[in-house]
Image (tube, helix red, strand yellow):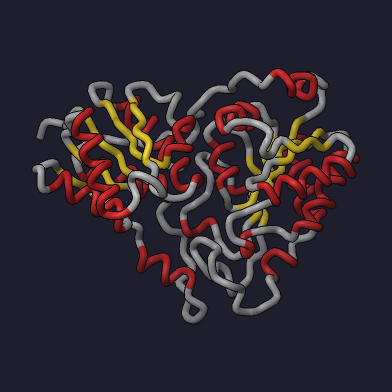
């Protein structure tokens, strides 16, 4: 079989899920020089792919002109007016991605779809008779879809995906201070994945007292307001949330010495630049396959409880009612994990 030359890759959804496709695409492109890719994803995520050679990005506006059945057909027409594809790789496997793939299929374009391993993940997260075994990483699951179509993809997790990027002018004095710079991202999409916010504030205070500089990363307006208050109260803590473009945030992350994050998007963003991530896991578990690209298991902070993991994405309430998986992690456990990495 002759390998197709132009691949359409579909992956919508959350930032972390989309960021996890980038290492796979980088390895695919490096190992298959005759191949080019067009990624269709949420418009905001374009900077994630701008460093990949032979990779186009086509923005999807899923709440506007690409919403619903008609929107997916409009997106299909846009893509076919611009490109001719040899194969479509669906790395999302949800209704809108199936619909977009279907339009290509009836036009005789070969399709391959992600196997999410739903039954395995259900067995891992069920409260009774839990099958507690590590599952394939999502990076491997993504790579396997390309292999279905004859592409050779070997994932070299020891290699960085992107190099450090230029620091925004306003932050250059911070990065030139001679101190180690630690990024702290205290929020997550779902509260069951979040370390208690007041406990994380204590960790930040401990780090600055130990002569580290902390850059605070967040998300929405309310989160930025919380971090603004931390900046006022904690010396050598600087809130960068909501003050820079997504591209600039990536450049800031690329220059960090460490990232402290939940099982969330910032873990995956830092991983693209080979920044070591101290990741804190509660309702979710690395066994589900969502650890960051090339991240060491030694940098994971978690408690081994019989109830963990109780969900794949952290979107289900704690059925025990006490959130012990996060409440039981002490501030000192996190602080020591961070400091240990610098002292080794």
Q: Position of residue 125 (x, y in %)?
A: 49, 70
Establish if 124 lies above or below 341.
below
- Judge from the rendering whether residue 4 lies leftward or rightward of residue 228; answer left or right: left
Look at the image and tell me whether residue 321 can be seen.
yes
Kindly identify the residue that appears in the image at 35 percent across and 61 percent down: 117
Look at the image and tell me whether residue 278 can be seen.
no
Residue closest to the eye, 229 or 236: 229
Residue closest to the eye, 35 or 58: 58
Kindly identify the residue that appears in the image at 59 percent across and 48 percent down: 297
- The picture quadrant where one finds residue 321 is bottom right
Query: Which corner quadrant holds the C terminus?
Result: top right
Establish if 89 lies above or below 172.
below
Residue closest to the eye, 308 or 183: 183
Q: How many marks?
A: 0
- Judge from the rendering whether residue 19 lies leftward or rightward of residue 26; answer left or right: right
Q: Position of residue 20 (x, y in %)?
A: 45, 42
Establish if 312 lies above or below 106.
below
Q: Position of residue 76 (x, y in %)?
A: 23, 41
- The picture quadrant where one finds residue 178 is top right
- The picture quadrant where one finds residue 32 is top left
Q: Position of residue 70 (x, y in %)?
A: 25, 51
Kindly identify the residue that appears in the image at 63 percent across and 71 percent down: 305
Query: Which corner quadrant holds the N terminus?
Result: top left
Q: Residue furthest bottom?
A: 128
- Judge from the rendering whether residue 333 lies leftward or rightward of residue 153; answer left or right: right
Establish if 279 lies above or below 21.
below
């Amino acid at each position: 079989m002759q390998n197709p030359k132009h691949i359409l890759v579909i992956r919508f959804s959350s930032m972390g899920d989309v960021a996890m496709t980038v290492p796979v695409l980088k390895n695919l492109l490096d190992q298959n020089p005759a191949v080019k890719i067009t990624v269709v994803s949420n418009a905001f995520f374009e900077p994630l792919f701008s460093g990949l050679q032979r990779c186009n990005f086509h923005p999807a506006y899923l709440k506007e002109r690409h919403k619903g059945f008609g929107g997916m057909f409009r997106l299909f027409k846009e893509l076919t007016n611009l490109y001719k594809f040899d194969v479509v790789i669906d790395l999302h496997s949800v209704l809108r991605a199936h619909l977009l793939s279907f339009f290509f299929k009836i036009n005789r374009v070969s399709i391959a779809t992600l196997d999410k391993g739903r039954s395995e993940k259900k067995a891992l997260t069920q409260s009774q008779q839990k099958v507690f075994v590590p599952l394939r990483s999502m990076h491997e699951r993504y790579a396997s879809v390309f292999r279905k179509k004859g592409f050779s993809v070997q994932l070299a997790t020891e290699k960085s995906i992107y190099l450090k990027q230029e620091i925004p002018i306003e932050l250059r004095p911070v990065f030139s201070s001679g101190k180690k710079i630690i990024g702290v991202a205290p929020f997550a999409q779902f509260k069951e994945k979040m370390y208690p916010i007041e406990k994380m504030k204590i960790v930040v205070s401990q780090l600055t007292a130990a002569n580290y500089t902390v850059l605070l990363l967040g998300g929405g307006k309310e989160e930025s307001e919380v971090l603004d208050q931390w900046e006022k109260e904690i010396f050598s803590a600087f809130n960068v949330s909501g003050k820079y473009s997504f591209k600039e945030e990536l450049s800031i992350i690329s220059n960090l010495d460490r990232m402290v994050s939940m099982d969330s998007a910032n873990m995956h963003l830092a991983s693209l630049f080979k920044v070591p991530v101290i990741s804190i896991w509660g309702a979710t578990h690395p066994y589900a396959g969502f650890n960051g690209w090339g991240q060491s298991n030694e940098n994971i902070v978690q408690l081994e409880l019989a109830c963990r993991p109780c969900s794949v994405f952290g979107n289900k309430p704690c059925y025990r009612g006490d959130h012990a998986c996060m409440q039981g992690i002490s501030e000192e456990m996190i602080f020591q994990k961070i400091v240990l990495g610098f002292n080794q």
